[in-house]
Amino acid sequence: MPSNGVEGRVNHKRVLRVMREESLLCQLKRQFVHTTDSHHRYQVYPNLLATTELTAPNQAWVGDITYIRLPSCFVYLACLLDAYSRRCVGWKLSKRIDTELALGALDMALTTRSIQPGLVHHSDRGVQYASTAYVERLHSVQAQISMSAVGNPYDNAKAESFFKTLKREEVYLNQYQTFAVAQANIAQFIEDVYNTKRLHSSLGYVPPIEFEEVHFQNSRV
């Protein structure tokens, strides 16, 4: 039956989602890329997050790094999440997995959030987070440094969960041809979808921004 020109237009993301749900996509083996180098000369810190009772935003942030495949290379994404609201408060995409990558996400978070001395900054023991420049930046705002135990991914489960959501709902539904396209799409997903619209069962089925707004409204009552 011929199309009327309207019904025939189908969003490619919807097609990919339906094909994935019906197991119609070819399952390619994904190359694993290590993003954590914990064998370094820098100081490591105890896990403070495990004993921190979360009662408000900007009390604790969790940071992590993941990789994204482009046609000719890998790029790396560093993110910081508010541990209370799960809001992504800082991020940076880079072609290099170095201290500047992690610092970019941290500087965005410090620019956009109002924090108090004593903020717990939690991450793995990777060299990017343990480096002199990164630690000095945290000390400059009187943050407390917290790191996961070696080989325990559950210590940073919220960041891992965020990356799984990002890849399942954005990255794997697209084939980024350039760094600029990847950066634009990821920025839109984080700011316009994940933080603003995506519901979280752990937050009472509201998105992170709304969860924070409700908290601040209640705190003023």
Image: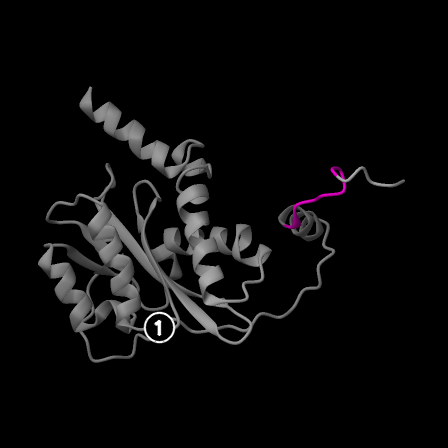
**Can residue 82 be seen from the camera position used here?**
yes
- Work out which quarter of the rendered image holds the C terminus and state it: top left
> Residue at 54% across / 50% down in the picture?
169
Instruction: State which quadrant residue 9 falls in.
Output: top right
Q: Position of residue 179 (x, y in %)?
A: 46, 66
Outermost residue, right side: 1
* Magenta region, main secondary structure: loop
Crowding at dot 1, Cα within 10 Å, few <14 / some 14-19 / many 20+, comes out as many
Instruction: State which quadrant residue 113 falls in.
Output: top left
Q: Nearer the viewer, residue 26 or 148?
A: 26
Image height of 81 relative to 65, above or below: above
Residue stretch in magenta: 6-12
Q: Position of residue 199 (x, y in %)?
A: 46, 36
- Work out which quarter of the rendered image holds the N terminus and state it: top right
Residue 161 relative to residue 111: left or right: right
> Residue at 44% across / 48% down in the picture?
188
Instruction: State which quadrant residue 141 falls in.
Output: bottom left
Residue placed under numbered mark 1 in the picture: 97
> Residue at 69% across / 47% down in the picture?
18
Image height of 74 relative to 159, above or below: below
Outermost residue, front side: 5
